[in-house]
Amino acid sequence: MPVRIVTDSSSGLPADVVEELGITVVDLHVMSDGDGSSTAGLSSLELVAAYARQLERGGDEGVLALHLAKELSSTWSAAVQAAAVFPEEQVRVIETGSVGMAVGAAAMTAAKLASEGADLQTCQDIAEDTLARSATWVYLHGIEDIRRSGRISTGTALSATLLATKPIMSITDGRLELVGKTRTQEKAFTRLVELVIERADGRPVFVAIQHNDAAEAAAHLESMLEQVLPDGSSLMTLPMERTLAVHTGAGAIGVSAVFMSQPEDLVPR
């Protein structure tokens, strides 16, 4: 039986991809109260149960777990505690340092190899390589939701407020950093396209655009990227996963890109 791939819902994987590749997705928690919505990470007990179910299906091949960055959620530390319950590294937890479809793409590539009979180490290697070749940016239509969530420092929030009304953040080693100072959505999109093209350096790239109640804007950004991406590139656009949407606010758009070094690096679709 193949290695089993487990991720959490923040990876943003579409349901058809999850089904096709046999990936297990464990939902993060969203709670609503009088002040709006908040989120909570997965507990070690929830993850022990999830990993155990997959080990029962996969025999001795093992489980590879990819969760959002430890800097953004308690889920990673809970996953490490859960993995320690199982003997002989049957469950391996990757420190992704990212979130969204960068993690989703790593899960996809690992699952594809797993379906072909690759062992646990090979699946881990390809997932880590995919993450190393990825980048994620987030365009914020406003700063208030992410400031209130505590996912950015006070200094970063102040800089974003003073320098831009439509900031662009990058996720670097699990932390959100201000990388773009724009005052209009169009300028922000132009800068996002530049960031992707600069990093691609002529190589094909897989780009996933995730939007929070901004389908028209996301389609416009997709059109801008289609005109300039290197040959062999691929794009997908989909709604933003709800736990990420809570923290980024309406109108936010995430761009995750995986840059190819070899033709076989293309993310399976």
Image (cartoon, rainbow, N blue to C red):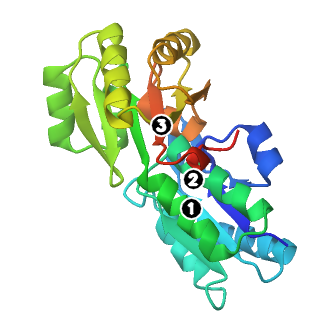
User: What quarter of the picture does the N terminus occupy?
Assistant: bottom right
Query: Is label 3 in contact with label 1 (beta carbons under 8 Å)?
Result: no
Image disc number at residue 256 = 3
Mark 3 closeness class: few <14, some 14–19, many ≥20 residues within 10 Å:
many
- Residue 200 place in picture, x, y as percent: 39, 35
Viewer can see residue 100? no
Residue type beneath disc 3: Ser
- Residue 58 place in picture, x, y as percent: 82, 74
User: What quarter of the picture does the C terminus occupy?
Assistant: top right
Image disc number at residue 126 = 1
Between the C-alphas of marks 3 and 1, the distance is 17 Å
Is 206 in front, or is 96?
206
Residue type beneath disc 1: Ile
Q: Which residue is mark 2?
A: 106
Callout 1: helix, strand or loop?
A: helix
- Residue 94 place in picture, x, y as percent: 51, 67
Q: Is residue 169 left or right of residue 107?
A: left
- Residue 245 place in picture, x, y as percent: 51, 32
